[in-house]
Image (spheres, rainbow, N blue to C red):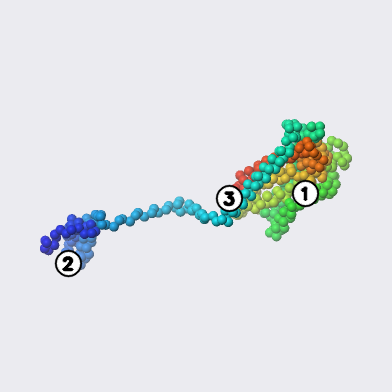
């Protein structure tokens, strides 16, 4: 070839120089030598020569960037990992005017509960201030109730009210738990719906109905059982009767009042317990059956442990309801202002019954004393309900409900 064909030429727009072109040709020549064929020979030498030429151009002719070369594309985005793919992506939508109004209404309704509770406590505190100033700390230790003589306190009526509530729980809790387990685990579907409706209906019955039933039906028919218990189990201190073996010694007692209150709180404890039991995980139920467990074994190993916290909360809520029961207790008991630990003996009292029986004839200091007693009862029931809420929220069933 003529040497004039190898004269230097200016670099092209792509940025390839004369040195780069010479290196490419040298690579092509090396390819022809290694292949043993020249460009003009037939066979596979043409392909090999082309491969060597391309290899030479690729190795030695990497174009150098120039001012006119196009910019390199930006690096591609990193590939997300599995952890990034599994992470939930937040989804948000702009709040409309209706959403803001609805949120404001719910917020006001929620805070109004605290406001109403605070106003009730403030009202009772202001109206009971005179009694607190008059009695001082003896209001919590005095058993007499004589506001005119400046001797009044709740040291007798408060323990009697707690005693009536405890008696109610002793009878209501076993009945409620067995009824809740039967409804949620054993009852047929049709019977289950009927029983749920009956329990809800019992919770809606007014307390005055229970009180009349207890006074006119339960008390006359249970006197024989109370007398037999006092005679044969009287060696137990709280089951003895000290005022003689006559009919009036066994009527209007804390035991009868506790039975009536037990019937009143049974629907509440039953409904709450049934709701908790029905939320036991279906997978754990089936796993217990797969391991060969019977139905009672499944209930004992899955349902009861799952609903333990909810049942405790239901019992505490029932206790708060029993502490505040008024009319039914007032119709049955014979009010006394001393603590009577003998539950079968006539004579009992409670703060709610005291307020209901003395409110119409009270004024001045007497009315202030009733308001102060109501404040103590309000605080006690509030504490019980708060503790019940804490127990439920920390339990497994309560946590799953919140989630």
The answer to whether any part of residue 247 appears in the image is yes
Q: Residues within 10 Å of mark 1 (few under 14, many from 20)?
A: some
On the rendered image, what quadrant is the N terminus found in? bottom left
219 to 234, vertically: above or below: below
Closer to the chain start, of discs 2 and 3, is 2
216 to 379, vertically: above or below: below
How far, Cα to Cα, is label 2 from label 3?
A: 82 Å
Tell me the tag on residue 403.
3
Disc 3, SS? loop
Residue that appears at 65% across and 50% down: 276
Q: Residues within 10 Å of mark 3 (few under 14, many from 20)?
A: few
Eye-nearest disc, 2 or 3: 3
Disc 2, SS? loop
Closer to the chain start, of discs 2 and 1, is 2
Tell me the tag on residue 41.
2
The answer to whether marks 1 and 3 mark residues whose Cβ atoms lie closer than 8 Å is no
From the top left corner, tell me how far across and down residue 289 is, in percent: 61, 54
From the top left corner, tell me how far across and down residue 101 is, in percent: 59, 54
Q: Quadrant of residue 236?
A: top right
Residue that appears at 75% across and 39% down: 371
The answer to whether marks 2 and 3 mark residues whose Cβ atoms lie closer than 8 Å is no
From the top left corner, tell me how far across and down residue 273 is, in percent: 68, 49
Closer to the chain start, of discs 1 and 3, is 1
Q: Disc 1 designates what residue? A: 207
State the residue in front, 249 or 64: 64
Residue that appears at 63% across and 43% down: 390
Q: Is residue 239 left or right of residue 54?
A: right
State the residue in front, 159 or 219: 159
How far, Cα to Cα, is label 2 from label 1?
A: 116 Å
């Amino acid at each position: 070839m003529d040497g004039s064909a190898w004269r230097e030429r200016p670099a092209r727009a792509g940025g390839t120089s004369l040195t780069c072109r010479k290196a490419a040709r040298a690579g092509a020549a090396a390819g022809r030598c290694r292949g043993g064929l020249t460009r003009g020979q037939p066979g596979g030498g043409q392909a090999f020569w082309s491969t060597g030429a391309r290899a030479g151009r690729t190795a030695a002719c990497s174009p150098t960037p120039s001012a006119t070369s196009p910019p390199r594309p930006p690096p591609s985005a990193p590939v997300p990992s599995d952890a990034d793919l599994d992470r939930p992506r937040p989804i948000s939508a702009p709040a409309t005017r209706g959403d803001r109004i609805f949120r404001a209404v719910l917020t006001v309704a929620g805070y109004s509960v605290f406001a109403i509770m605070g106003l009730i406590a403030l009202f009772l505190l202001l109206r009971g201030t005179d009694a607190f100033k008059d009695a001082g700390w003896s209001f919590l230790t005095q058993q007499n109730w004589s506001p005119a003589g400046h001797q009044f306190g709740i040291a007798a009526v408060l323990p009697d009210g707690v005693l009536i509530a405890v008696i109610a729980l002793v009878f209501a809790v076993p009945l409620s738990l067995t009824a809740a387990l039967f409804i949620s685990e054993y009852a047929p579907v049709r019977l289950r719906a009927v029983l749920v409706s009956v329990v809800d209906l019992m919770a809606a019955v007014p307390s005055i109905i229970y009180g009349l039933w207890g006074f006119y039906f339960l008390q006359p028919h249970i006197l024989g059982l109370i007398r037999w218990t006092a005679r044969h189990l009287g060696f137990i201190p709280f089951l003895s009767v000290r005022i003689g073996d006559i009919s009036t010694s066994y009527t209007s007692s804390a035991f009868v009042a506790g039975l009536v209150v037990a019937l009143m709180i049974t629907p509440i404890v039953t409904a709450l317990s049934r709701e908790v039991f029905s939320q036991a995980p279906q997978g754990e139920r089936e796993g217990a059956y797969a391991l060969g467990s019977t139905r009672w074994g499944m209930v004992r190993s899955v349902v009861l442990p799952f609903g333990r916290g909810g049942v405790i909360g239901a019992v505490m809520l029932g206790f708060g309801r029993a502490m505040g029961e008024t009319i039914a207790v007032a119709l049955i008991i014979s009010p006394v202002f001393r603590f009577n630990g003998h539950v079968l003996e006539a004579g009992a009292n409670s703060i709610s019954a005291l307020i209901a029986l003395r409110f119409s004839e009270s004024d001045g200091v007497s009315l202030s004393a009733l308001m102060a007693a109501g404040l103590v009862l309000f605080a006690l029931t509030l504490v019980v309900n708060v503790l019940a809420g804490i127990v439920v929220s920390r339990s497994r069933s309560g946590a799953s409900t919140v989630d």
